Every structure is written in structure tokens, then in C-alpha cells.
Amino acid sequence: MMILPIYASLLAILFVYLSMRTIRIRRRLRIGLGHADNPELLRAIRVHANFAEYVPMALVLILLVELVAARPWVVHALGCTLLIARLSHAYGMRQQRENFRFRVVGMVMTFSVLLTSAIYLLGALLIR
């Protein structure tokens, strides 16, 4: 049984939530394009965009880790870390009075998943 689809599904739900939140703010403010210098909308757009910028690469790398026959706990650790990272980052960034700790923790965890996956793959490929 593959493990990554569980985390990809949960992250997809989070992505849709962030998308819907941005759309709701756009509708309420009647701003169809851009952010019109509205800090609330700009923040929502960046939370959504940041997710879209990092999660696809992380999921691809975790998938490759799973495909090179990593132990299940490794895939669970990477997937769970990525999910917590993106929840933390989104929570920290969406606050009007931003709590940078959540944002920083989210980014450090996201970068950790990316780097750990990349290093794991390089190690697995070089050892063969």
C-alpha cells in the first residue's frame, strides 16, 4: 500500500481551503484581480501562493523516496512533517498581527522535508 496518497489528499484539502478563503475575501472586498493594496487580501494570496510554490516539489520528492523502497516510517515522517509545516505556516501568516514563530517553524520544517528527501534520494541512488 502506498503511503503518500494519504498526505497528498490531506494537503489537497488544505490547498482547497486556502483557495476558498482567498476567494471569500476577494468577494467580500470586491477585488477580482490583484490585491488593491489590501493587506488582508495580500496576506491570503501569499499564504495560498506559498503553499502552491513549495508543496508540489515536496510531494514529488516524497513520492520518489517512497518509490525507492524507503521504510514506511520515513515516508510517514516526511508526509506528516510537511502537513504540520504547511498548517503552521498558513496559521502564522494569516494572522493580522503575524506570529513569526509559526511561519518560521513552517518554513524550516518545509525546507527540512525538501532537503531530507533530496539527500535520502541521492544516498539511495549512489549506494546502489
Image (cartoon, grey):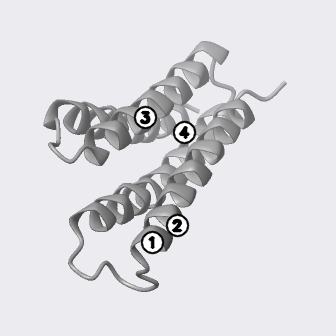
Dot 4 corresponds to which residue? 125
Of pointers 1 and 3, the one earlier in the residue sequence: 1
Dot 2 corresponds to which residue? 23
| Residue 91 placement: quadrant | top left
What's the residue at 49%, 46% (across, down)? Answer: 58
Instruction: Using residue 72 as the reference point, say whether residue 93 is left or right of it.
Output: left
- What is the crowding at mark 2: few (fewer than 14 residues within 10 Å), some, or many (at least 20)? some
Q: Are marks 4 and 1 in contact (CB under 8 Å)?
A: no
As shown in the figure, which amino acid type bears the numbered disc 4? Leu
Q: Which residue appears farthest toward the top when viewing the image?
A: 73
Dot 3 corresponds to which residue? 87
Q: Are marks 1 and 2 in contact (CB under 8 Å)?
A: yes
What's the residue at 35%, 32% (across, down)? Answer: 88
Q: Which residue appears farthest toward the right when viewing the image?
A: 1
Dot 1 corresponds to which residue? 26
Helix, strand or loop status at disc 4: helix
Q: Nearer the viewer, mark 4 or mark 1?
A: 1
